[in-house]
Amino acid sequence: MYNWLSIKVVANQRQDDQAAQDTYEFFHDILTEDHLVSDLSVEVSHEYYVVHYRQNGEEDSKKFPVELIEALLTSIENEPKYNHQ
């Protein structure tokens, strides 16, 4: 779920980045097809991302610190070769 959420944040911020979109779809498929996760939704607060989901018929959630989830986006944005126009 951590990888899915990290790349979701990247894909949302970099809508024209096809690699980010493809990677997001890849992780989404793993969650939904391999792990049978459904009804994914994300809440964002100042400190945490909270992912709500359903798995095996039961609702659950996981909480991740904002700085941990946004580290991938920050890393990509700070790498010049990924930011050419």
Image (cartoon, grey):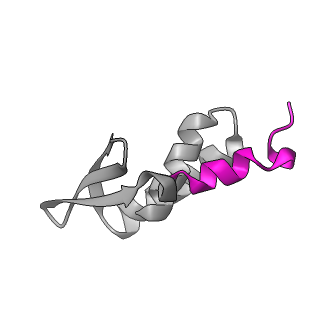
Residues in magenta, as a range: 70-85
Q: In the image shown, does 84 or 45 lie closer to the viewer? A: 45
Q: Main secondary structure of the magenta part?
A: helix
Task: Count how many numbered circles sit on residues in the image.
Answer: 0
Instruction: Answer with the quarter of the image where residue 28 lies.
Output: bottom left
Q: Is residue 2 left or right of residue 45?
A: right
Q: In the image shown, does 72 or 14 lie closer to the viewer? A: 72
Q: Is residue 1 left or right of residue 8?
A: left
Residue 49: image location, x then y, percent: 36, 50
Q: Is residue 2 magenta?
A: no
Residue 56: image location, x then y, percent: 18, 67
Q: Residue furthest front?
A: 46
The residue drawn where x is 65% and y is 49% is: 74
Q: With respect to residue 72, does 36 lie above or below?
A: below
Residue 66: image location, x then y, percent: 44, 51
Q: In the image shown, does 60 or 33 lie closer to the viewer? A: 60
Q: Is residue 74 left or right of residue 47?
A: right
Residue 57: image location, x then y, percent: 13, 62
- The N terminus: image quadrant: bottom left
The residue drawn where x is 39% and y is 62% is: 31
Q: In the image shown, does 66 or 23 lie closer to the viewer? A: 66
Q: With respect to residue 49, does 32 lie above or below?
A: below
Q: Is residue 72 magenta?
A: yes
The residue drawn where x is 61% and y is 55% is: 72
Q: With respect to residue 83, does 57 lie above or below?
A: below
The residue drawn where x is 40% and y is 57% is: 65
- The C terminus: image quadrant: top right
Q: Is residue 64 left or right of residue 58?
A: right
Instruction: Answer with the quarter of the image where residue 12 lies.
Output: top right
